[in-house]
Amino acid sequence: MEEPAVGECRVLSIQSHVVRGYVGNKAASFPLQVLGFEVDTINSVQFSNHTGYTHWKGQVLNAEELQEVYEGLKLNGVTQYDYVLTGYTRDASFLARVVDIIQELKRQNPRLVYVCDPVLGDKWNGEGSMYVPEELLPVYKDLVVPVADIITPNQFESELLTGRKIQTQQDAVQVMDMLHSLGPSTVVITSSELPASRGSDYLITLGSQRRVGEDGRMQTLRISLELPKVDAVFVGTGDLFAAMLLAWTHHHPNNFKLWLDLG
C-alpha cells in the first residue's frame, strides 16, 4: 500500500504554546504546513513566553482538559491521523492521557507513526538538569516510549531514560539499543557532548534504526553525523528538528540517512 499523498496526510501535534517566541507548536506546525501536511494542534501548556525567560506565566493543561478537547474531535469524526507528534509537557496526568489517545488512534489506523520528542532537560557546561517536573520521567519510561515509533532525545534525556551515562560512541550505541528494547524502531540522539573528529566546533548526532529486511531478518542501521556548531543560543530547535524528521520520514520512508541529513 502506498503512503498517502502529503496533502492528504494529517498530523496531530501535542506540544506547548507560547505567546512570545517560537517553540512547541509554533515551531513545528508552520514548517509542516509549508511542506503540505494538514496539522491539528493541541496545546499542552499555554504560556506568556518560553521558560528560558526570567519570568513566565500561564496555564498547564491536565488530563481532563486534554480529554475534553479530544472528545470534541471524536464527536465530529475528525480523528483520522497519519502521524502524532508530541513535545513539551508539564503535567504527568496529561502525558499519561496522551498515551491513551495514541493507542486509540493506532487502533483506528495501525499505520499511524508516533514521533516523540521526550522533552525532559538538557546539559549546560557539562551539567545536566531537568526543566520539567521529575514525576514525568517514569511516565515517559513506562508508558510513552513503549508506544513511540520514533524518539528524538538529546544526550541528557537518553541518559535519564536508560540510567546509563554516555561517554563514548560505544556507550551511545548501547543506550540506543536500550531505548530500542523499550519499543521505538528509530532512535535519534539529536545532540551529544561526544568529541567530534573534526574538532570542537562540531557536535555529533547519532541515529539507530531497526527494521525487518527483505530476507525477513531484523537489521540495525547506525548513523553518526558531525554537524558544525553555531555560536548562538536558539530555542525551539528540538521542536523544529522533530517536525522535520517526521516530514522526511514520510517523503523518504526507506532512507534513514537522508532523514537526518535533511532534518
Image (spheres, helix red, strand yellow):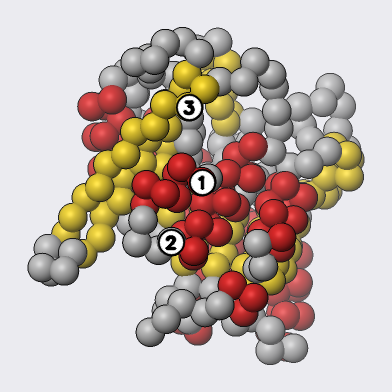
Name the element at disc 2: loop
Q: What residue is shown at x 31% (from left), y 45% (from top)? A: 208
Residue 55 position, x and y percent, is 87, 27
Q: In the rendered image, which residue does mark 2 sit on?
A: 252
Horizontal side of residue 158 vs 31, given as left or right: left
Q: Amino acid at mark 1?
A: Leu
Within the image, what quadrant is residue 197 found in?
Answer: top left
Name the element at disc 1: helix
Decide which of 221, 50 is in the foreground and name it: 221
Q: What residue is shown at x 86% (from left), y 33% (from top)? A: 56
Distance from disc 2 to disc 1, alpha carbons, whole Å, reads 10 Å
Within the image, what quadrant is residue 129 found in?
Answer: top right
Residue 31 position, x and y percent, is 69, 54
Q: In the rendered image, which residue does mark 1 sit on?
A: 262
The reply to whether discs 3 and 1 touch (Cβ–Cβ < 8 Å) is: no
Q: Residues within 10 Å of mark 2 (few under 14, many from 20)?
A: few
Q: What residue is shown at x 56% (from left), y 77% (from top)? A: 5
Residue 18 position, x and y percent, is 83, 45
Decide which of 103, 180 is in the foreground and name it: 180
Q: Earlier in the sequence, mark 3 or mark 1?
A: 3
Name the element at disc 3: strand
Q: What residue is shown at x 48% (from left), y 81% (from top)? A: 109
Distance from disc 3 to disc 1, alpha carbons, whole Å, reads 12 Å
Residue 227: numbered disc:
3
Horizontal side of residue 243 vs 195, given as left or right: right
Q: Amino acid at mark 2?
A: His
Looking at the image, is 171 positioned above or below residue 135? above
The reply to whether discs 2 and 1 touch (Cβ–Cβ < 8 Å) is: yes
